[in-house]
Amino acid sequence: MDADRQQLRLAVQRQPADFIAWVMLADAELEAGDVAAGEHAATRALQLRDHHPEALARLGRARWMQARHAEAAALLRQASDSAPQHPGIALWLGHALEDAGQPEAAADAYRHAHTLLPGEPYITAQLLNWQRRLCDWRNIERLSAQVRQAVAQGQAAVEPFAFLSEDGSAAEQLACARQRAAAIRASVTPLPATAVRGQGRLRVGFLSNGFGAHPTGLLIVALLEQLAAAGRLDLHLFALTGNDGSAIRARLQAAATQVHEVGAQSHQQIATRIRDTAIDVLFDLRGWGGGGTPQVLAMRPAPVQVNWLAYPGTSGADWIDHVLADAFVLPAPLATGFSEQVRYLPRAFQPSDNTRVLAAPPSREACGLPAQGVVLCCFNNSYKLNPRSVQRLFAVLHGVPGSVLWLLSGPGNADARLRSAARQAQLDPARLVFMHKLPHPDYLARYQHADLFLDTHPYNAHTTASDALWAGCPVLTCPGATFASRVAGSLNHHLGLAHMNVADDRAFVATAIALGNDAPALQALRAELALRRGDSGLFDMAGFARDFSAVVEDLARERGWQGAA
């Protein structure tokens, strides 16, 4: 790919009026993560052919990568209007509209792209994923079957993160990730091999777009503070997004040896920065989630690279050596579904911020809740609320008279669609109460009004489950046969509340109904949770730091590290 970019750069130098060469160069630069160079090439193409849809689309894509979402959507809308039969432009328009806060219009764009190219699995998967976010379940089984069949046949590279929401096996998830990784591998040139240092304090890097008021930042901040206090590791954060000014970001910066601001850099520049920092062990804290940079990891900037925490599945990539897990979330029989070597922590793989203090919540009425009645909650993102999960949530509502279901408000018309589904299930839609996104302390405080958290399947509550348990709200879950379906179960297991992990949907509904109709039992459960929160070790970040450091040092020792000086 680097050679192709160089050839295109030479081509436009030789023939600066070659419109096609400028468009191709814009593509190559943007794929390499060099947004400034991609923007320049797209602008030159527009100077040659004003309002040409291909040039407009590349400039719109550059604006999207610069997080200038409204401008990106406007440019891509112009391009799509000029080339309504172009599925790729419609796909990019969907991405831009998502981030520009126009979710229903984004779905229309994805649907248009799918109509133009119905056999393309990547586009089908994008439409499927966005319909899940909007709780729009029209044709969802057919779309899912098409995507799963494409993965099974190795037809195309589908985004692995979106694939986690499908009811597939760990083997299917591995196949999906491997196909996506193969496409990335073909687009980059690895750096020369490097080695772990022989002696001295290990340099540990963390690469993420979540170093701030983000689930990743919330999970790791207290752990990093404990790691810094212990002094065994030299901690470096490579931040793909800028400083959001949050308290979490300030704490992360205080804990880390250094925060490297690399968000505006190309993939090559980020990889070189990691290499120049002489990182021994690099943790990928994004994986296949949105906003990550798998191309950087594919260049092999560090001698040991680990998948951990943010992406609940396998990378499928030969550039990731290990995955950090625990024996519940990733038991030995499921390890065959991972390309990485599994490294086990003796505790739950997920850390948490154990310094948080619960504020007093607003009144029930101020939260939109009735003055009386059991409050069941599920604050998972809307894409996890698939028909199966919603059906069992509604079954619990039927079985607990006077109860309400408290949900996180979704994008677009998602809430209205869920109310419509409730009506079709013979439930009063008013029994669904929606909470809009709030600052984390305000959201956390509201768990004090919730009696029981009801989980989803096959994509569990992850950070959300940790939040609920920390705030004193028990979590009922049904662990499955994939990593993403076992995270809440892992937290319950390590908390000592394994009885809140049930075998199937029937047991899930029966347990929730029994608890919902037995106020003393619910009170006893909350008291048990309060006790276990203090003595189980799940929220012991000093202990987590010791275990984490030991794993890192073992990984380095296997590569020749002799120990700290």
Image: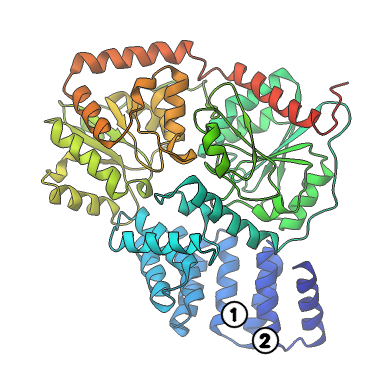
Question: What is the spatial separation of the Cα atoms under label 2 and label 1, in whole angstroms?
Answer: 9 Å
Measuring 50% from the left and 79% from the top, which residue is drawn there?
A: 79
**Residue 313 placed where, x, y %?**
53, 43
Residue corresponding to mark 2 = 19
Measuring 59% from the left and 74% from the top, which residue is drawn there?
A: 58
Is residue 384 shown above or below 455?
Answer: below
Question: Quick one: SS at disc 2?
Answer: helix
Residue 213 in sight from this viewpoint: no
Image quadrant containing the C terminus: top right
Residue type, numbered disc 1: Ala
**Residue 101 placed where, x, y %?**
41, 58
Sequence-earlier tag: 2 or 1: 2
Image quadrant containing the N terminus: bottom right
Q: Alpha-carbon neighbours of circle 2 within 10 Å: few (<14), some, or many (≥20)?
A: many
Asked if marks 2 and 1 touch (Cβ < 8 Å), the reply is yes
**Residue 229 placed where, x, y %?**
69, 19
Q: Is residue 511 left or right of residue 438?
A: left
Residue corresponding to mark 1 = 55
Question: Quick one: SS at disc 1?
Answer: helix
Measuring 41% from the left and 31% from the top, which residue is drawn there?
A: 465
Q: Is residue 240 left or right of residue 64?
A: right
Q: Nearer the viewer, residue 277 or 191?
A: 191
Residue 214 in sight from this viewpoint: yes
